[in-house]
Image (tube, rainbow, N blue to C red):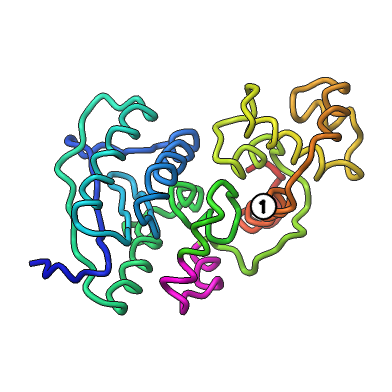
Amino acid sequence: MDSGTSIGYQLVLRLQDDRVIAPHATSRRALARSVLAVGRERGLLAFGAADTHLHLLVLCDRGAAGLLARSLETALGSELELSVSFSTPAITPIHDQRHLGAAFAYVQRNARKHGIADPRTTEASSLHDLPSLRTIAPWLAERVRQALPRVRRTDLLEILAMPQLGVDGDVSGDLPDACAAVFGLADLAGRSTEAVRARATGVALATGLWTSGAIAAALGVTGRTVERLRLHPVAPADLEGLRRQFAWRAALRPAGTGPNF
């Protein structure tokens, strides 16, 4: 029983029929965006989805943990267009710092623990936010540093199958998808602020490496649009995140295969 002095809570959410919550890249990114948006002001420390369930680690009291679960169920139901409801969430207290560290490692390794070998499923976890392969939640890494100062970046990279945190990966493969992934987007369509930032980041990285025509063709825009995007300010963190996306994708490709992710 929770004594009222818990550091935080571990939550597990699953659908009533135990179906896969986020089966593809689009839904995994939507899940991550929802979790980060709902969890930012509610003490979110880590999250990770295996196929049929979602683990979250939060630093808050029991009431706030229950509210987070309800808010997230609503957000995911809408964002993922789920046709079934969630089961009653399992909410377990975190008793001390050692327990917190163990729970953090468990949440991050949850998909691997359940035998899910595809490393792309890690997009539905905070593993992409902490080493900045995704840049929409810069606050999360600082929260982890404060709560768990012994967590090593090398441990996270090992789960991601990255030998090191490269920032100079070749600009190859699917440029639009890599750009979208940095911002947690399904694709680069639309005129939202983040879609424009994602396209501008891709143009900034490819400029000097590809011709303007090649960049336009890759991003599905006109040459004039490429020139406009070159004038758009690009955050250094976003540019570095895109480089890390390519480094991660290169690390996942078997030797001798083509550039597509």
Q: Position of residue 241 (x, y in %)?
A: 67, 52
Relative to residue 124, is residue 162 drawn left or right?
A: right
Q: Quadrant of the C terminus?
A: top right
Question: For the stretch drawn in magenta, what is the main secondary structure?
Answer: helix
Give the vertical position of 47 relative to 166 (above or below). Answer: above
Give the vertical position of 72 relative to 187 (above or below). Answer: below
Give the vertical position of 1 relative to 225 (above or below). Answer: below
Tag 1 residue: 241
157 within the magenta span: yes
Q: Position of residue 3 (x, y in %)?
A: 11, 70
Q: Quadrant of residue 27?
A: top left
Amino acid type at circle 1 is: Gly
Residue at left 27%, top 64%? 8
Q: What is the secondary structure assignment of the residue under circle 1?
A: helix
- Give the residues in magenta: 144-159
Residue at left 85%, top 27%? 228
Residue at left 38%, top 68%? 105
